[in-house]
Amino acid sequence: MMSISYYYVNKNRKLIGFQLGMNISTIIGGMAAMTTGILLIYQYPFHFTWITIISTLTGIFIGSLFGGMFDYQTLLTGFGNGMMMGLMAPMIGASANFSTLFIGLVEAAFGISFIILFLAIRNS
């Protein structure tokens, strides 16, 4: 899903304004970090340190990758949001007590954010 959205955003990046670019890097970096952290803490419940590091690096990488398509301020926004969400995601996942309803909600929010992203780019 990330590679498809990266290709789509990169193909249409000349049509995307500054504010939409900021929102894209914030949403994609944050949601990637959150889903990575929550899913990994569900799979490996007692490896908090490594999961926090992995989810933080994932959020930083994805947020910076999408933000870097636009300008340095957007890159910084994607970096910061990916880092903060990556640090918080394992804590959120650990406090959710392995709820499948919560995982479904997070994955639905992740999918809906991609749909909104595609619609926002198409309408810009």
Image: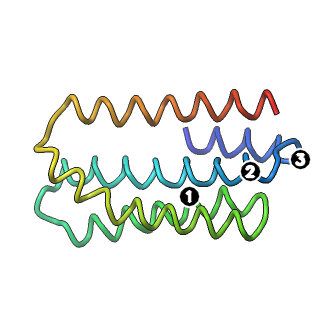
The x, y position of residue 64, in whole percent, is 62, 64
- The residue wearing badge 2 is 19
Q: Is residue 108 left or right of residue 15?
A: left
Q: Is residue 33 above or below residue 72?
A: above
- The nearer-to-camera label among 2 and 1 is 2
The x, y position of residue 51, in whole percent, is 27, 64
* Image point (68%, 31%), residue name: 118
- The nearer-to-camera label among 3 and 1 is 3
* Image point (69%, 27%), residue name: 119
Give me the C-alpha separation between circle 3 and circle 1.
20 Å
Q: Quadrant of residue 72?
A: bottom right
Residue type for callout 1? Ile
* Image point (53%, 68%), residue name: 80
* Image point (74%, 43%), residue name: 9
- The nearer-to-camera label among 2 and 3 is 2
Residue type for callout 3? Lys
Task: Identify the element where label 1 is drawn.
Answer: helix
- The residue wearing badge 3 is 14
Give me the C-alpha separation between circle 2 and circle 1.
18 Å
- The residue wearing badge 1 is 62
Q: Residues within 10 Å of mark 2 (few under 14, many from 20)?
A: few
Task: Identify the element where label 2 is drawn.
Answer: helix
Give me the C-alpha separation between circle 2 and circle 3.
13 Å
The x, y position of residue 96, in whole percent, is 16, 44
Mark number for residue 77?
none
